[in-house]
Image (tube, coloured by chain):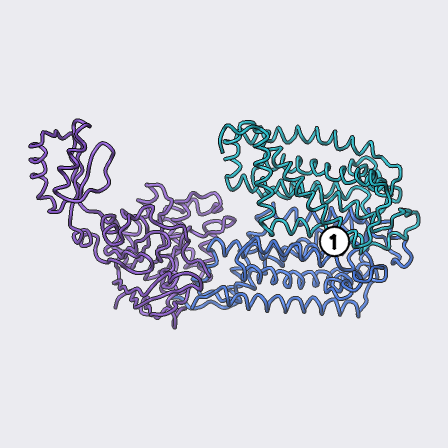
């Protein structure tokens, strides 16, 4: 009989598998990378008229909109990590893993590995698309690193929410059902216009309290204005908060799913 | 199903089965109702400030301006969702049973199209009620407004024929993005947020020839009873219907060959 | 010490009846135990409990000497399992499965390569193991699954319907390997199946489970002997005499299912009755076209114990559905 391997080894093994299977599904990866980029170009062209609104920041709408891609990437991370795990539950692969000395933490953290790698890959494509489209990152190279840091924390947080949903329901369809909810949250935020330029009261109110708005404002500030410590700190804190919440939800859901003694 | 069934009853059978499935499964119905609502909220609510862009002069206001887009979008995506249903039917093997049972197979295609229109009508009614509550302003004459709804409802056929063509060709749910994304992008390459005249650059050049532009501009004109490319819009429906009809019939042939 | 020792093991789901209702069983070391029953009888639920994946509602079970409730991790270390429908990742290769599983078992890299290669060779999957599982046939998946289950040298092997859906060749190959494991390596095998011939061919002892309880247990030979009675099936030369044939046969036993052109009975007095039957038919002037004598099978045992035939008797409810 073999002893239980260290957590790092387990995370390594499961994370490595998660990354492999993610990269081996071009049919999932390509749309997840291409779709946000297409939407970036199309929406920013359609909404360019916003630049002439009084009170709109003095940047191109394209720069203003670049953040959308990162947010859509985070939503794909939610769905991707959760869908993979739900498929493992449906197929019985999770039972195979459960028969080894694997720990629950090893499973959840390892599974998030795929989400993080995917998130970084996406972010790289989005940044490249932004630079090709003529955007500049006002906060410079440090800003780019900061964007990556945000992307990683968001991928873990949103990925964990997807994993929690998968563990709770065990159904890929239910995980996909998170998609519309996430998109709703994305739309009802400061994604298209700054808060000051949202005249409809109920919409402005939702956008004000919507955590997504804080994430958007933080990343956007790095792109269009440079270093704004207050905006950045709040955004980062919200991202960390989502991560803690997601991981906690996943941990609770794991207890209900892994019934093994 | 018996062989005696004629073409019409086959159409009615398939359409009513699809509609029953839709009405009985909230998991299918709710997203197709909520998505347009979400768009309406995000566009009419979130972007209302765009009415203040210099040159924006739509008399009924931004909510009404966006209502037209959401109406067309909801109707067309009602068709795309029906393509999903058809692909699912092929995955489950149900559609193969239809192919065996129905003597005139074009009835299958028409059955799905009819069910898509029923779906679209439900969604459009829902969108309209919500929009009226949100301050939709119907300035045009009842005839104009009626024509707007007719145009929107018929544009549903374009969406279903496109998606059914994909569904019948590939016969798997994996191609759902192929049904959805090109249509989605085409919609957004039209004057969605502001009138055509306020678009500039590459998107203006595409929007100038995008058939969806004519539908939206005609619809917005009808809503307020102004002159617009209404004739061209009907031509878009007619020609688009013919082209996509041929496309989906060819796909049906390929499904018959297995 | 027995490899598996189960006492009053019960599992109730929130809705519905008890999936497993107080079963007792003992499996000796190195033995192949066949657990036989229709779909939904409680086979898979039992396997899930014995493999520690599902806690029992009540009762006890010791596997490899460890309590499945109190000592789950140790049980898992001592067992290997190939559960229903070989759950593999279609995007990984066979070797990548081996390495993932080995790493999670805490095996050293060199041990994984050596042991993995050896097992892949043995199940005839060495070459295919560098390809992705997505392209494997059903039989290949089961063989890889078996190799994975054996990777960490378990003493007890659980196979949940290992050959369902396999073609005859793949099935025979798997049977050979399972028999070899028990014979040459002394591995204890707990095998669930809904195929009688599988239990008959492989298992030293068979337990028949129906509606969550064990209705019969013993060696296949003993179980068949317990039923004891052979059956005979006769086709008359002239179809017109079928009714007469049936009437004559009825004196010797109870009628059972037969082809349309003949009649069959379970013999009240066993094989000894064959000669009197032939004489009786002769006396009636019924000429015999064909006569077949059948020894009792496990299906007969199942019929006797449950009042139903095994094949096609399963209800549609899936086992192990969580309430």
| Crowding at mark 1 (Cα within 10 Å: few <14, some 14-19, many 20+) | many
**A12 in relation to B15, above or below:** below
Q: Residue at x 89, y 57 (%)?
A: A58
Of residue A146 and residue B64, the one placed in the foreground of this image is B64
Q: Is residue B255 visible?
A: yes
The chain drawn in cyan is B
**A258 in relation to C244, above or below:** below
Q: Residue at x 78, y 38 (%)?
A: B212
Q: Position of residue C65 (x, y in %)?
A: 31, 69
Q: Position of residue C251 (x, y in %)?
A: 12, 42
The chain drawn in purple is C
Left or right for A145, reference C136: right
The residue that disc 1 covers is A127
The quadrant of the image that shows the C terminus of chain A is: bottom left
The quadrant of the image that shows the N terminus of chain A is: bottom left
Chain A's colour is blue
Q: Position of residue B143 (x, y in %)?
A: 82, 38
Q: Is residue A142 visible?
A: no
Left or right for A258, reference A212: left
Of helix, strand and loop, which one carries label 1? Answer: helix
Q: In which quarter of the view is residue B82 placed?
A: top right
Chain holding disc 1: A
Of residue B200 and residue C227, the one placed in the foreground of this image is C227
């Amino acid at each position: 009989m073999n002893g239980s391997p260290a957590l790092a080894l387990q995370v390594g093994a499961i994370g490595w598998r998660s990354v492999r299977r993610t990269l081996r599904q071009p049919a999932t990866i390509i749309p997840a990378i291409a779709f946000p980029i297409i939407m970036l170009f199309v929406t920013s062209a359609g909404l360019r008229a916003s630049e002439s609104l009084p009170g709109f920041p003095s940047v191109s709408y394209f720069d203003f909109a670049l953040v959308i891609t990162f947010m859509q990437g985070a939503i794909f991370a939610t769905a991707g990590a959760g869908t993979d795990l739900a498929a493992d539950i449906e197929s019985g692969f999770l039972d195979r893993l459960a028969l080894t000395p694997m720990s629950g933490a090893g499973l959840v953290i390892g599974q998030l590995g795929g989400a993080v790698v995917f998130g970084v890959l996406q972010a790289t494509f989005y940044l490249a698309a932004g630079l090709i489209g003529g955007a500049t990152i006002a906060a410079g190279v440090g800003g780019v690193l900061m964007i990556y840091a945000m992307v990683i924390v968001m991928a873990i947080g949103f990925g964990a929410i997807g994993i929690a949903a998968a563990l709770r329901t065990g159904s890929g369809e239910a995980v996909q059902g998170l998609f519309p909810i996430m998109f709703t949250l994305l739309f009802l935020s400061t994604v298209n216009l700054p808060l000051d330029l949202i005249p409809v009261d109920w919409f402005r109110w939702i956008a004000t309290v919507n955590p997504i708005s804080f994430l958007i404002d933080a990343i956007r500030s790095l792109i269009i204005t440079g270093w704004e410590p207050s905006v950045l700190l709040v955004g980062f804190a919200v991202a960390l908060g989502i991560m803690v919440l997601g991981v906690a939800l996943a941990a609770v859901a794991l207890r209900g799913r892994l019934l093994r003694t | 199903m018996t062989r005696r069934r004629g073409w019409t009853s086959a159409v009615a059978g398939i359409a009513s089965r699809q509609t029953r499935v839709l009405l009985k499964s909230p998991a299918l119905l709710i997203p197709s109702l909520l998505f347009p609502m979400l768009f309406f909220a995000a566009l009419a609510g979130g972007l209302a400030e765009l009415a203040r862009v210099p040159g924006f002069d739509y008399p009924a206001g931004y909510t009404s301006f966006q209502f037209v887009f959401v109406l067309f979008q909801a109707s067309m995506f009602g068709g795309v969702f029906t393509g999903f249903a058809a692909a699912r039917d092929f995955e489950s093997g149900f559609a193969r049973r239809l192919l065996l049972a129905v003597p005139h197979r074009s009835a299958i295609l028409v059955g799905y199209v009819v069910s898509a229109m029923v779906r679209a009508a439900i969604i459009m009614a829902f969108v309209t009620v919500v929009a009226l509550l949100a301050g939709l302003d119907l300035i045009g004459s009842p005839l104009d407004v009626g024509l707007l709804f007719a145009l929107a409802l018929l544009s549903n056929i374009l969406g279903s024929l496109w998606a059914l063509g994909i569904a019948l060709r590939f016969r798997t749910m994996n191609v759902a993005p192929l049904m959805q994304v090109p249509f989605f992008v085409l919609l957004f390459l039209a004057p969605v947020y502001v009138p055509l005249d306020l678009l500039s650059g590459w998107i203006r050049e595409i929007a100038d020839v995008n058939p969806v532009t004519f539908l939206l501009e005609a619809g917005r004109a009808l809503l307020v009873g102004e002159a617009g490319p209404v004739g061209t819009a009907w031509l878009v429906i007619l020609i688009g219907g013919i082209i996509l009809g041929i496309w989906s019939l060819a796909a049906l042939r390929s499904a018959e060959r297995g | 010490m027995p490899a598996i020792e189960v006492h009053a093991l019960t599992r109730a789901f929130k809705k519905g009846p008890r999936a497993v209702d107080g079963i007792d069983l003992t499996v000796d070391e190195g033995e192949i135990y066949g657990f036989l029953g229709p779909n939904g009888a409680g086979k898979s639920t039992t396997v899930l409990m014995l493999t520690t994946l599902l806690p029992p509602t009540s009762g006890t079970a010791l596997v490899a000497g460890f309590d499945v409730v109190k000592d789950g991790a140790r049980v898992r270390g001592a067992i290997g399992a190939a559960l229903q429908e070989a759950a593999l990742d279609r995007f990984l290769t066979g070797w990548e499965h081996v390495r993932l599983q080995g790493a999670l078992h805490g095996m050293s890299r060199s041990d994984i390569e050596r042991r993995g290669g050896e097992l892949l060779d043995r199940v005839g999957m060495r070459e295919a193991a560098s390809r992705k599982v997505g392209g494997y046939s059903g039989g290949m998946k089961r063989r890889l699954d078996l190799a994975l289950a054996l990777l960490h040298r378990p003493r007890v092997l659980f196979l949940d319907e290992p050959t369902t859906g396999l073609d005859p060749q793949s099935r025979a190959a798997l049977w050979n390997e399972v028999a070899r494991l028990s014979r040459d390596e002394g591995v204890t095998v707990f095998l669930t199946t809904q195929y009688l011939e599988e239990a008959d061919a492989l298992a030293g002892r068979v337990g028949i489970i129906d509606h969550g309880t064990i209705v019969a247990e013993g060696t296949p030979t003993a179980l068949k002997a317990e039923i004891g009675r052979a059956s005979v099936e006769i086709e008359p030369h002239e179809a017109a005499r079928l009714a007469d044939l049936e009437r004559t046969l009825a004196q010797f036993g109870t009628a059972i299912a037969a082809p349309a052109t003949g009649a069959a009975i379970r013999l009240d007095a066993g094989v000894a009755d064959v000669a009197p039957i032939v004489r009786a038919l002769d006396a009636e002037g019924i000429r015999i076209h064909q006569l077949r004598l059948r020894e009792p099978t496990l299906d007969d045992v199942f019929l006797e114990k449950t009042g139903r035939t095994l094949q096609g008797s399963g209800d549609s409810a899936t086992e192990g559905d969580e309430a």
